[in-house]
Amino acid sequence: MEEGKTSLRFGVMVDDMTLQRWQAETIKKLTDSGMQLLLIIKNEESAPKKGLFRKIKEYPFRRMFFQVWNHRLFKPECKAMVDLSAYCELEKIEVLNCQPQHQGISTIISNNDIETIRNQELDFILRFGFNILSGEILTVAKYGIWSFHHDDEMVYRGAPPGFWEFMHDDPVNGIILQKLTEFLDKGVILKKVFYPTILHSYKAHLNQLYFESESLPLEVCNEIIRTGGVFEYESKSTAPVYRAPKNGKMLKYWLLCPIRRLSFHLHDLFRQEDWDVAYAEVPLREFIKDPKSYESDFVWFRRSHLNTYYADPFVISTAKDTYIFFESYNYKKGKGSICVALKSEKFKKHHEALCEPFHLSYPFVFQDNGTVYCLPEANESNRLTLYRFNEKELILEKDSVLMENIRAIDPTLYFKDGKWNLFLGLQKYSNIKLFRYLSNDLRGSYETYYNNPIKTDCQNARMAGAFFTDGDTLIRPGQESIRYYGTAVRLNEVQVLSDDYYSESQIIRIEPFNECHFKHGLHTLNGNETMTVIDGKRFFFTFSGLFHQLKLKVKR
């Protein structure tokens, strides 16, 4: 931790005291968490007056449809204009009225204003105005000027945010918080996250991008305060710079919107998910080296009814037997239970080990001091409950409640250096964000990691199985959920796992098997020294699935 620091000092660059809602809420998140807003740098530059002839001459008629739509018709909640005074105490904050100069497309701040800003000894400046900045202003604050770009700068530079992902049917949209340099949209990356593109509604997608980006500056601040610095890297982007769409592209956009929306709802209603579980007697560390070569070795479970599917397999061996735990989901009941199959029975019998009034899934199993425990997902119960496995009765018995008032998704434990690390998703961000909690004891209490979430990425944040090692490498399986839920499993090498920091990098992407019925998804991978277990998905139609989806849509 940076000695003596419990908060950071920052300034904000604005064109006006009214901001877009997401911008004002970004500032409020910082100040509510103890960061000190000391300076507002306000752009006092007045726009030059233009005559009618010049206005007509310079009007972008080739982009007229976008201009009218964006300024008059398109009204996402994130861009609603709000008074900054409603979000912070302006009377306590110094305001610097600044009249910048221009050199080409660059905005230059005068030396006098630079000196005024420097005297505030700011840690960073958040930019919500002034266009393209250049010169000494970029280094006047200790950690520079921070600016958002609501695209992956390696693919899309320029504007509008998230629009070209929507138009190009790109399933993933990056967001970066960057420290500005002299290079356009390729500064120093402070934070980068990935969200799924909402392809049936650009309005919903833009709201997601803007509202979800509000917490990024605070996350960087927390890292600086705790570790005394921030992990950053310079972007090497050579991506093209996009501009507002021309009229032809806007006509295509207006045609795409109703088609995408109709397709989305029809897919939801008439293509239900159908999962099954498979196992192969091959060590997990061998399987991940060449998954496709073992495809024919996997044996798929047989299910008794089309209204039921199996998913989320975990395998564990004891002195008595080897067990595969899995979710058994019933579309008519609208919930799942936990079942177990035994190697001594050739995994042909499926015993119900746990049934509750609420939905159960993801039966994470592990051993501690000779006892087999299960920590299933039970987010509808609003608590995290630990169970013991009774090998004689083949049932799971309640042990203790680890956490209350939490809608936990896919909870997974990992023990290291005398501490239990609990990784999970939260129901609201189930496929996008990964959270971490720590405890000195298995049964808690579990304290939140200082800078949650530890990862925001629809490509591999959600847990897809237990941590495992391959030699000296610790690996975390993550779910890929782009285009739809559970498309593949991505393996991530854990590089740092300490009280102060967590980092990982992707090493392998494991796709569903092509030569089987369940080739449209894979979202769980587990194993041990003798066996590997997976699940697979296909799409099919049942009336019970249709009624289930209709009930969900009405509920929403």
Image (spheres, rainbow, N blue to C red):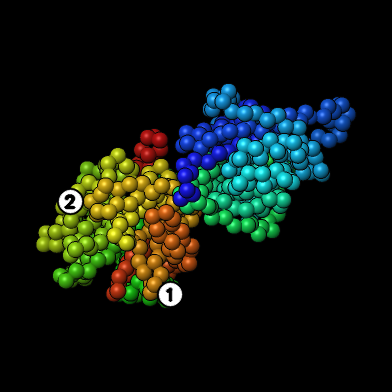
Is 475 displayed left or right of 124 in the figure? left
Report which residue position mark 2 lands on.
399
Q: Amino acid at mark 2?
A: Asp
Q: Nearer the viewer, mark 1 or mark 2?
A: 2
Q: Earlier in the sequence, mark 1 or mark 2?
A: 1
Is 87 displayed left or right of 356 in the figure? right
Query: Quarter-wise, where is residue 59 in the image?
Result: top right
Residue 167 shows which numbered tag? none
Is 16 displayed left or right of 438 in the figure? right
Q: Residue at x 35, y 41 (%)?
A: 547
Report which residue position mark 1 lands on.
289
Q: Amino acid at mark 1?
A: Lys
Confirm whether residue 258 shows in the render. no
Residue 107 locus on image (x, y percent): 76, 41
Confirm whether residue 504 shows in the render. yes
Q: Residue at x 22, y 63 (%)?
A: 367
Query: Quarter-wise, where is residue 93 in the image?
Result: top right
Residue 383 locus on image (x, y percent): 27, 43
Q: Point out the image quarter for the C terminus.
A: top left
